[in-house]
Image (spheres, rainbow, N blue to C red):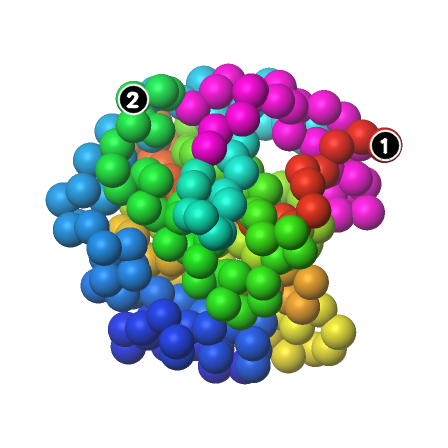
């Protein structure tokens, strides 16, 4: 498997890479080109990561994750993206052995975030790219959006406490928003049916990792304070995780 974090991929090459190896990355320049918005418009999203409430559902007893959640339906033709009434996030235990099987009611995304032009463009253009790789049945994507901050206040922060996993969707986009004062946080992507895999670290804001969820598993390693001698200097890692699923949202039953 090959990963290149420096060469900008246009939409067609990203689609080819998704089909051939199950994942690819977009540089910030490639992201802005795909979304059709300047970098400043993406940067306008960043302040919303400073207002994320704690995740109250962590079963490992940790206090290192803050997040919000929202759900959307994207109709491809005619093109339309609509937010749906706030709902619980749910996954079966087959995909999330640690937190699956329970309804997790996270705080909703801020309405002012959803009103920003870059938000609609980011979700819609990524959905169109994924549809080019594999069109969804019914011409609709059911999208869940998660704004995450993982911090090191307790010494160690775990971006994926469930370990290497799939999400039970068609495609996943991990939008890297930024990091400060941390080491670690290596991204790992493996072939779901074999031993091949790659590892790399997302460091440039607005780099995007695209995953064909049925064909790969992924995880991110824990983060620790950059200066172990001063653990009180809390560091953090911010991401936006978008999942695209055909046929409907994952729900109990």
The structure residue drawn at horizontal position 37% and vertical position 54%, both measured from the top left corner, is 125
Residue 160: image location, x then y, percent? 58, 45
Residue 85: image quadrant is top right
The residue lying at 65 percent from left, 51 percent from top is 138
Residue 117 placement (x, y as % from top left): 25, 37
Whether residue 170 sits left or right of residue 152 in the image: it is right
Q: Is residue 113 left or right of residue 18?
A: left
Disc 1 to disc 2: CB gap under 8 Å: no
Q: Residue at x 44, y 48 (%)?
A: 78
Magenta region includes residue 101: yes
- Residue 81 image point, x, y percent: 44, 39
Q: Which residues are magenta?
A: 82-109
Identify the residue at image location x=42%, y=47%. 79
- Numbered circles on residues, count: 2
How far is mark 1 from mark 2, CA to CA?
A: 33 Å
Secondary structure, magenta segment, majority class: loop
- N-terminal-most mark, 1 or 2: 2
Q: Identify residue for label 2.
A: 112
């Amino acid at each position: 498997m090959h990963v290149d974090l420096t060469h900008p991929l246009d939409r067609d090459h990203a689609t080819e890479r998704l089909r051939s190896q199950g994942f690819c990355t977009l540089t910030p320049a490639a992201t802005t080109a795909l979304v059709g918005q300047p970098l400043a418009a993406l940067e306008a999203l960043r302040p919303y990561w400073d207002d994320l409430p704690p995740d109250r559902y962590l079963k490992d007893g940790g206090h290192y994750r803050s997040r919000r959640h929202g759900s959307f339906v994207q109709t491809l033709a005619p093109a339309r993206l609509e937010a749906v009434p706030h709902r619980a996030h749910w996954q079966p235990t087959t995909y999330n052995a640690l937190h699956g099987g329970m309804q997790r009611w996270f705080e909703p995304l801020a309405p002012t975030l959803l009103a920003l032009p870059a938000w609609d463009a980011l979700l819609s253009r990524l959905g169109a790219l994924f549809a080019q790789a594999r069109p969804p049945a019914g011409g609709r994507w059911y999208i869940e959006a998660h704004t995450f901050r993982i911090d090191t206040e307790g010494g160690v922060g775990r971006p994926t406490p469930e370990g290497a996993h799939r999400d039970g969707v068609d495609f996943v986009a991990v939008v890297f928003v930024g990091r400060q004062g941390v080491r670690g946080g290596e991204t790992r992507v493996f072939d779901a049916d074999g031993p091949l895999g790659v590892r790399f670290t997302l460091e440039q804001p607005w780099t995007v990792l695209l995953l064909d969820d049925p064909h790969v598993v992924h995880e991110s390693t824990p983060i620790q304070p950059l200066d172990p001698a001063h653990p009180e200097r809390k560091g953090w890692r911010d991401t936006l995780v978008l999942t695209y699923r055909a046929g409907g949202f994952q729900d109990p039953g």
